[in-house]
Image: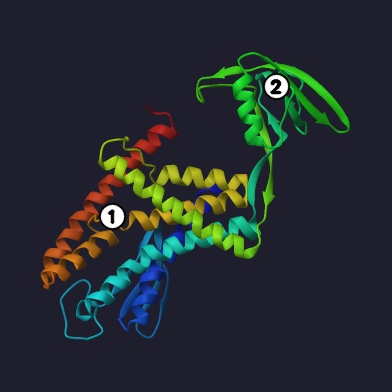
Amino acid sequence: MTTIIAWIVVFGVLVAVHELGHFIMAKLLGMRVEEYSLGFGPSMLRIRGPETLYAVRLIPLGGYVRLAGMEGKPSDDPRDYPNRPLWQRFVVIFAGPVMNLLLAALLYALLFGPVGIPVATTMVAHTLAHYPAQAAGIRPGDQIIAVDGHPVQNWSQLDQLIRQHARHVMEITVKRGQAIRRFFVRGRWDPTQKAYLIGIEPATRLIHEPLWMALKAGVSQTVQLTGAWFRALASLVTGHSRFDITGPVGIAVLVGQAAREGLPYLVLLAAGLSANLGLFNILPVPVLDGSRLFLLGLEGVRRKAMDPERESMIHLVGMALLLLFVMFVTYHDLVHYLHLG
């Protein structure tokens, strides 16, 4: 239940903000917005404004903003989407992905500031059953201060030293209360991580940055993620990396895990998902914002708009292909998480 609720809330917020970008910019530019909807299918909540219907629908798998004239027969109304200048239509479409990137930066800023970013420490939070640390007598709450006589100040140093020395018996020095204790431990090969491990999990503490530093870090993190996303896309296109994507089921599992681990982890995941949603939407795939931006660019070059019926058919085919793709990815998620394969 936690997983389902967390997924609906997180995904709902990301979609609402994305569609809000289209909605706000369309209103600011004087376009007529017929509907702002979260979800698909039958409506659970409907509020009729002066010219816009606001709705929450049953299936929480997306949302949409319906602009007058975008679909259906063209009209001469100057407020209709097709009759607006090219740059205005471009801005309205581009505003959705931009809002997701802005939300990502804000969430990262909240994480670095008020929420606090979790940082691993040298204190033991848990010891894993059947692993050497627990067998040797190391307990949760022990503060590891040295490995084979090498002092450790942070988890990064500790992890590196353990991986370097774990093939052989090593001396782990811990502080337990006021006492200093020494344990002799030899690592065990973990085929999953392909490393020798002793079986400890670190305790974490939250670091809070001042507001201006948190805002700067939020923007920087979003910029770095955007760069990494485009590099990964280029690597995929050139065949230097294999295709690997997580679908709705996999994302729901990740959101549920983050929710159980605590607010900082949920905010961190939501920020990454928001940025990825915005970036994914700029791909020139029919039915995504990127395809509309591409067609607007083509219109600018040709100085002639595409036939509305042909454009609608392109997006209809794109919707069908996207649904098939989602079904394919969902199937692989189910095989992976239910161990059906």
Measured from the top left, where is residue 190 in percent x and y? Answer: 55, 20
User: Badge 1 local density, few (<14 within 10 Å), some, or many (20+)?
Assistant: some
Measured from the top left, where is residue 78 in percent x and y? Answer: 22, 86
Spatial separation of the CA atoms under disc 2 and disc 1:
48 Å
Q: Quadrant of residue 41?
A: bottom left
Question: What is the number of the mark on residue 283?
Answer: 1
Total numbered badges shown on the rendered structure: 2
Left or right, 327 with reference to 267: left
Q: Amino acid at mark 2?
A: Ala
User: Badge 2 local density, few (<14 within 10 Å), some, or many (20+)?
Assistant: many
Residue drawn at x 23%, y 73% is 70
Q: Residue furthest top?
A: 168
Instruction: Classify 287 as above or below 185.
Output: below
Residue drawn at x 21%, y 62% is 294
Left or right, 193 with reference to 95: right
Q: Amino acid at mark 1?
A: Leu
Q: Residue 42, can we see it?
A: no
**Is the Cβ of the residue at disc 2 closer than 8 Å to that at disc 1?**
no
Q: Residue 299, can we see it?
A: yes
Measured from the top left, where is residue 67 in percent x and y? Answer: 28, 75
Left or right, 22 with reference to 321: right
Measured from the top left, where is residue 338 in percent x and y? Answer: 44, 32
Instruction: Classify 133 as above or below 315.
Output: above
Q: Compare residues 341 and 98 and report the one nearer the observer.
A: 98
Question: What is the number of the mark on residue 133?
Answer: 2
Residue drawn at x 71%, y 36% is 153
Label 1 residue SS: loop
